[in-house]
Amino acid sequence: MKSSQTMPSPPLVWLKFFRWFCRRDCVEDVEGDLLERYEVRLNIEGKHAADRYFIRDVVKLFRPGMIKSFEGNQKLNYYGMLKHNLLVSFRSFRRYKTAFLINLIGLSTGLACALFIYLWVEDEYAVDKFHAHDRQLYQVLLHHEESGTLNTGTDTPGLLAAALEEEIPEIVAAIHSTPSFWFGRMPLTHKENTIKASGQFVGPRYFELFSFPLIHGSAAEVLQEKYSIVLSESLATNLFGSAEAAVGQTLDWSARHFADRFQVSGVFEDLPNNTTEDFDFVLPFEYFADMLGEGVNWGNYNSLTYIMVSENTELTDLNDKLSGFIKAKREDSNVIAFARPYSEGYLYSKYENGHQAGGRIEYVHLFTAISIFILLVACINFMNLSTAKASRKTKEVGVKKAIGASRSALIAQFMSESFVMTLISILMALGMVALLLPQFNTVTTKEIQLVFDGPLLLNLTIILFLTALVAGSYPALYLSKFHAAQVLKGQLRSSIVEFWVRKGLVVFQFSLSIILIVAVLVVHQQIEFVQNKNLGYSKENVILFPNEGKIAEKQADFLSQLRNTVGVIDASATTHTIVNGGGYTTGVSWEGKNPDVQTRFGNMSVDFNFLSTLGMELIKGRTFSQDFSSEHEKLIFNETAIQLMGIDDPIGKKVNLWGQDREIIGVAKDFHFESLHEPITPMFFKMLSGPAQTIVVKIAPQNQFETIERIERLFQEFNPSFSFNFQFLDGEYQKQYAAENVVAILSRYFAGITILISCLGLFGLVSFTAERRYREIGIRKALGATSASIVRLLSVDFNRMILVAVFIAIPLSYYLVDMWLAGFAYTIDLSWHYFVLAGLASLLIAWVTVAVQTMKAASVNPVKSLRSD
Amino acid sequence: MGKTYLGEFEEIVMLTVAILKGDAYGIAIINEMEERLGRSVSIGSLQTVLRRLEEKGYLTSALGEATKVRGGKRKRYYEVTVAGQRILDETKDQRLSLWNAIPRLNPRSSS
């Protein structure tokens, strides 16, 4: 037949594919089978069908049993070497279990810490970044020139936004808002249902600038009407049952002595977690401007200003235009306006004399540094243990070199060991992170989730490679350096360099640990100090609640009834928040004042009995009293203010406040009316004119529960529809230091982990030294050495290293904590005992670690160690 | 290693190789199986089983002479080894003992 003489021609691509993947030992006969079958089919069923069957056969042959192994048939032996290296790695893990466990625990906790910090830092950077116009959003801040320095603040005149929008072409939109803490929680009433919620007054284009999505209503329209209100989804649901039901309904709003009816014009989705804004509803700024009345002018700072600029606007050009903007409006103005990217406000909030001076970003940097250090400490363990067991690996290296292994092949081997180690650790670290994330979120008050998205995986890979490289590089370079001949003859001696490197690394580890111990001690002490410092007033047993509803109308009546309640020691009212700071004025002038210098005075409007309620002391004069008339024209200054004004015998002297002469009737002892980050500044008390913001009550320490119930009943008598929400002053006070508290807790954990990892490393090193000197110890004991002398022999080296670490760490840690404390105006003294304590603690921990191992080595019966020779 | 058993397909392949005695190469085995059992067998599944059985030591193979057909590729002939013979016998005995153990229900009633 003709066809049997010509060569069959199955699809060539598939035939080549088969030849490529098939095992070498059966490629010939199976190809023969394929072709034979193809010929038969070609004759019976035709070319088309035969081709199809051929392809199917080839595809079916592509299975594990038939595919050639990757091994041994490539020109370069990568696969084989890799397999060998992995095998050797796993064998060494199994053989040196202690070292493996120490590395595993150290690296995985280190990596877990690094991961936690990475997640936290990412979350910090993401705050406020989600707005669609993020790159165009800026906040306008003001530098106030006061007494020769620049004080920076966020409050701006209520006329600024409109003027900016009109006069500066780059500014597309400008709006005002009020921070939600100004009004606290305001009652909103719909029928019988009253809910207190925090809110802001915002300009009409608020929802166009900020991407808080609206469920109902359009961003351009919801705030157009003066009596419209926009609620959050959950507030709308609580008040009206659902977001849909809320739209178009009216509700009654009140704050202090203002009250009005608003119509719901829209509903926005509940604010996300990563925003610094905090409000449940917004009202039109127009209404707030009406509330202020004449207060809206270029010399009053009573709103925040946000602007959206056109794309490609240079910040420096913008700031050039802004700086003189307010001065041009008002001649005697002392403020310089400037813009700051809105999303930077969270991390870069602090200004010193007109210059950006950090803020939360300092903590972000601090923790990033800590995470790097912890990882480094864990890597050092790996380096030390790998080089320490070099004596065990020398034979292996020698034999390999003798057979012809190149140095690079050996480096690859040791690197792959560290790579495998890191990979296992990173998987364990991920497990730990997943497990401990809820606790971490509680401590940091965040809602971080572990989401395996692109950036996280990329960063994990980077961390993996960097850690493996750092941990593996030194052992790899060191171990691969041996000379085969010397090693096999047993002539290897540890070089001086190796000796110093290993010691240096241990010293470095312990220095870091000591620095962290000092930091934890100092941070803890400082926070204790801040929370227990004598503030000049007593914050214990003092409760605060908002002055609202009918109470605001009949304040004097309410207060006198309150004072007569059983368990209440004293009561008063103020416009000040006491802990968060309050109003300021530069409108004080006195005899001999330099007219060119403006000085800010804290301004506290108080009712009778305020000083006694908070236990403030008077140095001179008297406090406000009902026994005297026209108390509204009298003032009480604090010591700092009197000193600043240079008035010798202040009682009875007059100063000018807002154009009116007022008599000084008393001098109060200095007290801290702001955070301890700030020094005490001049301030004065004046009598309340009009309703206060907060009622302050000092109650007896006994039966507080009953007392508060009685106060609540009295409150309900005046305001039947309001719920009674009170706070303890000391609780409010602690909230100011939330950031420091988180830092204190986290630094405690991280210091603990660093010490743990360092000790693990030390433990490993000691045990290796003890093992290497196994016979020596045996001989010494046989010749009569005591256990104690053996312990001394083994631990003297380590003690010396730790002592060196102490001496390095103490000056460094002093420098570092001193820098941190500089952020507080009032600090603890850095006494020597923090450093001695830290040094002793690390010495003790190290000694215990070393002692456990050396004692074990020393107590071995010499018969055992010497018998094998 | 414990005792190895033959899978169903393995057993059939071994039996077919035994039937073909001396003439058992890939396509011949397939043809024989298709003819006798009416089941279609792909080269892939047959070849993997043949290699596996060879690794287990139940089959041995040798390459034949090159011919003009099959693109000049040689055939690989398989033969059952002694161990293979033994495992076939064992398998058969096991099957038989199982068959024998089945109780015949009322053997008389059927007749």
Image (cartoon, rainbow, N blue to C red):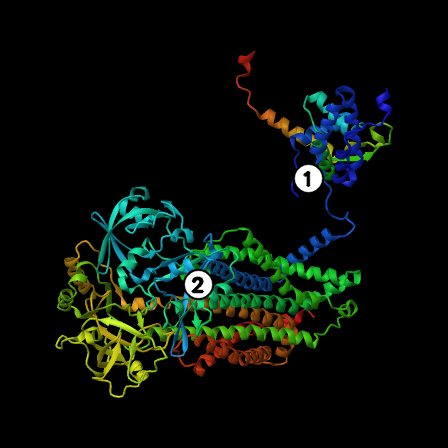
Task: Tell me the residue that label 1 is attached to.
Answer: A64
Q: Residues within 10 Å of mark 1 (few under 14, many from 20)?
A: few
**What is the secondary structure assignment of the residue under circle 1?**
loop
- Decide which of tag 2 and tag 1 comes sooner along the chain: 1
Instruction: Give the image quarter of residue A570.
Output: bottom left
Rendering coords of residue A164 (x, y %): 41, 60
Q: Position of A126 compared to B13: left or right?
A: left
Disc 1 marks a residue whose amino acid type is: Pro
Mark 2 is surrounded, within 10 Å at the Cα level, by few (under 14), some (14 to 19) or many (20 or more) other residues, namely some
**Badge 2 element:** loop
Q: Nearer the viewer, residue B41 or A550?
A: A550
The label shown at residue A345 is 2
Res A92 visible: no
Residue A860 vs A343, above or below: the answer is: below
Image spot of residue A8 (x, y percent): 82, 27
Q: Nearer the viewer, residue A799 or A412?
A: A412
Q: CA distance from mark 2 to mark 1?
A: 60 Å
* Quadrant of the image containing the N terminus of chain A: top right
Q: Is residue A843 above or below residue A198?
A: below
- How many numbered markers are drawn? 2
Query: In which quarter of the view is residue A284 placed?
Result: bottom left
Q: Which mark's residue is nearer the viewer, 2 or 1?
A: 2
Q: Chain of mark 2?
A: A
Residue at 75%, 28% (x, y): give it: B17
Residue type, mark 2 in image: Gly
Check whether the beta carbons of the residues at disc 2 and disc 1 lie within 8 A of each other: no
Task: Answer with left or right where residue A438 lies relative to residue A859.
Answer: left
User: Which chain does the numbered disc 1 sit on?
Assistant: A
Residue shown at 28%/73% (left/top)?
Answer: A603
Please indicate, yes or no, whether residue A682 appears anywhere in the rendered image: yes
Residue B81 image offset from top left, x and y in percent: 76, 34
